Amino acid sequence: MSERLDLDRLQSLLRTEFAGRSVSYHQSVTSTMEVAKREAEAGAPEGTLVIAEEQTAGRGRMGRSWVSPPGVNLYVTVVLRPTLEQLRYLAVIAPLAVCQAVEETTGLLPRIKWPNDVAIGDKKVCGILVQSELAGDEVQFALAGIGINVNLDASAHEEIAQIATSLRAELGREVSREEVLAATLNHFETLYQALRRGEVVSMAWKHRLDTLGKHVRVESAGGAVEQGVAVDADSDGSLILRRDDGSHVRIEAGEVTLREAGR
Ligand code: BTN
């Protein structure tokens, strides 16, 4: 396995117009989100890919950290310049693109765990972090951060050993990071272009959503808790819960944690 990503091979596998065509490659960074933010503020074009072999302070959702050892996984952030309307859908198309890419390159069938984790069985293989900078109603830029466990040995990392997996662990062989990344960018751009044309992109997302039909407990960053059966999902990624008293509540994706409540 190569410890360095082969950027020429990556380019040769891309079918995109803009996603991944401008690359900012780093051996080690705190977080690709941080680097991408600086580059976006300095005017980086849409589709700029910030990629690192290692993150020393990889960020997860809800203020958590993201395990980011060198040379085995993908840690990328894509700089985007969507409209406010398109922005709401980035967290829908990013996990969908990863599912499609993993399926295409490995034959595995990952599912989306609401709001935007990608899992194989009950173990997480990819996390997505979308951040944006607004000026009034105008989006200055958005950052789609994607972490994919490609050749990670999750058992070597105590904090995620029970809850994470990798493509290598599932397949029993090494997986090409270049192939997975190129396929992810290819699918992402296709979905993003569809979004720009005003097409509905959420049906395929919903089809992959593993959470529907399950009894779940959702906790927001503010501490509010909702519990019930996930009966449906809206096109913008919101989840519809039927509470135990029969009433329904719509929960927006975002800073929330979901746990299966086990019944
Ligand atoms: C989560 O599931 O909590 C989101 C994890 C997002 C991880 C990726 S790795 C690339 C980018 N840089 C970061 O610091 N985080 C995202």
Image (cartoon, helix red, strand yellow):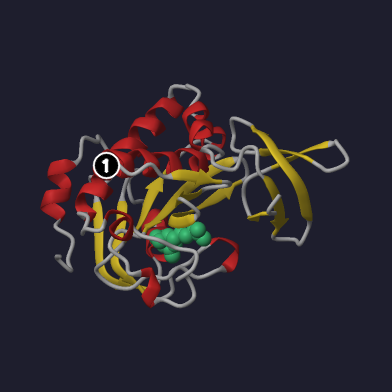
In this picture, is 168 found above or below 181? below
Residue 152: image quadrant is bottom left
Instruction: Please state the horizontal and vertical placement of residue 19, each as a whole percent of the image.
Output: 29, 42
Can I make out residue 247 in this image? yes
Give how far across and how far down residue 114 sits, in percent: 58, 46
Relative to 60, is 141 above or below?
Answer: above
Give how far across and how far down residue 126 sits, in percent.
Answer: 42, 55
Q: Residue furthest front?
A: 263
Q: Relative to 217, is 205 above or below?
A: above
Residue 33 visible: no
Q: Residue at x 14, y 65 (%)?
A: 2
Decide which of 25, 252 is in the foreground and name it.
252
Q: Amino acid at mark 1?
A: Ala
Image quadrant assignment for residue 219: bottom right
Instruction: Name the quarter where the N terminus is drawn.
Output: bottom left
**237 displayed left or right of 95:** right
Q: Nearer the viewer, residue 243 or 219?
A: 243
Residue 118 x, y percent position in the rendering: 46, 49
Q: Quadrant of ligand 1?
A: bottom left
Per the image, the residue denoted by label 1 is 183
Q: Residue at x 52, y 30 (%)?
A: 202
Q: Nearer the viewer, residue 133 or 206?
A: 206
